Image (tube, rainbow, N blue to C red):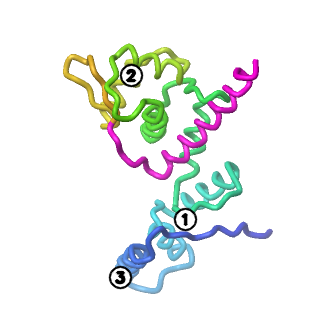
């Protein structure tokens, strides 16, 4: 049985070396093959080798294009499964990491540097989800620090932040779904 090669990429070689050295210092005797693979995976930002392997497999399923940064593509895949073919969230996910990536997709829908009233925010959010609960989305966006609002809830403002690599991937793919679903409408 042949093994599937798993590429090892590190966004910062210096940090990678530091992480690996720190792990090697804690070893009393030479580490086993599996221990070394787990150390390498942790040094690049994964929990362990299995986590890295699952992320790579998900990345392969999602696209054949290489990624310059280590990303958890398994989490991206789980998040994308929450959206329909038109880029709308079908239900509120139960897992917090998936919720957070979903919220980044809603953050991307809100216009930057624009004060919005609650009704405007609701309209934008309602167009991007199917379960009819804009309030949980608004509260969660505020709770995650992606949006600020006045105490009375009248004005909302998107906070400009750089999304994590997984969130950028989700945003890109959800926007592509929305464009694909909107294209036939323009031709009609």
- Identify which residue is drawn at 58% across, 36% down: 175
Between residue 112 and residue 148, name the one nearer to us.
112
N-term-proximal mark, 3 vs 1: 3
Give the class, few, some or many, for how many residues have Cα within 10 Å of label 2's Cα (few <14, many ≥20): few
- Identify which residue is drawn at 57% across, 78% down: 33
Task: Tell me the distance, in whole angstroms, between the alpha carbons under discs 3 and 2.
Answer: 46 Å
Task: Tell me the distance, in whole angstroms, between the alpha carbons under discs 2 and 1.
Answer: 35 Å
Give the class, few, some or many, for how many residues have Cα within 10 Å of label 3's Cα (few <14, many ≥20): few
- Which residue occupies the extreme right position in the image? 1
What is the magenta range? 159-188
What residue does disc 1 label? 49
The answer to which image quadrant residue 89 occupies is top right
Q: Secondary structure at mark 3?
A: helix
Residue 43's spot in the image, x, y percent? 44, 70
What residue does disc 2 label? 136
Residue 107's spot in the image, x, y percent? 42, 34
Q: Main secondary structure of the magenta part?
A: helix
User: How many marks can you see?
Assistant: 3
Q: Secondary structure at mark 2?
A: helix
- Identify which residue is drawn at 35% across, 42% down: 160
- Which residue occupies the extreme left position in the image? 151
Between residue 61 and residue 146, name the one nearer to us.
146
- State yes or no: discs 3 and 1 in contact (Cβ < 8 Å): no
Q: Is 145 placed left or right of 184 in the picture?
A: left
N-term-proximal mark, 3 vs 2: 3
What residue does disc 3 label? 25
Q: Secondary structure at mark 1?
A: helix
Q: Is residue 109 in the magenta section?
A: no
N-term-proximal mark, 2 vs 1: 1
Residue 8's spot in the image, x, y percent? 57, 70
């Amino acid at each position: 049985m042949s093994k599937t090669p798993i590429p090892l990429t590190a966004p910062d070689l210096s940090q990678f070396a530091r992480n690996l050295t720190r792990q090697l210092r804690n070893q009393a005797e030479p580490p086993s093959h599996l221990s070394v693979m787990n150390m390498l995976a942790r040094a690049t930002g994964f929990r362990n080798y299995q986590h890295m392997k699952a992320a790579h497999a998900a990345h392969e399923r999602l696209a054949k294009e290489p990624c310059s940064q280590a990303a958890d593509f398994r989490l991206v895949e789980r998040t994308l499964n929450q959206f329909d073919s038109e880029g709308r969230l079908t239900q509120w996910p139960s897992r917090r990491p998936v919720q957070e990536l979903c919220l980044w997709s809603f953050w991307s829908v809100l216009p930057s540097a624009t004060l919005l009233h609650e009704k405007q925010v609701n309209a934008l959010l309602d167009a991007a989800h199917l379960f009819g609960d804009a309030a949980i989305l608004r509260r969660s966006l505020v709770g995650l620090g992606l949006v600020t609002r006045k105490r009375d809830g009248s004005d909302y403002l998107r906070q400009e932040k750089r999304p994590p690599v997984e969130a950028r991937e989700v945003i890109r793919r959800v926007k592509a779904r929305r464009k694909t679903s909107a294209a036939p409408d323009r031709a009609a």
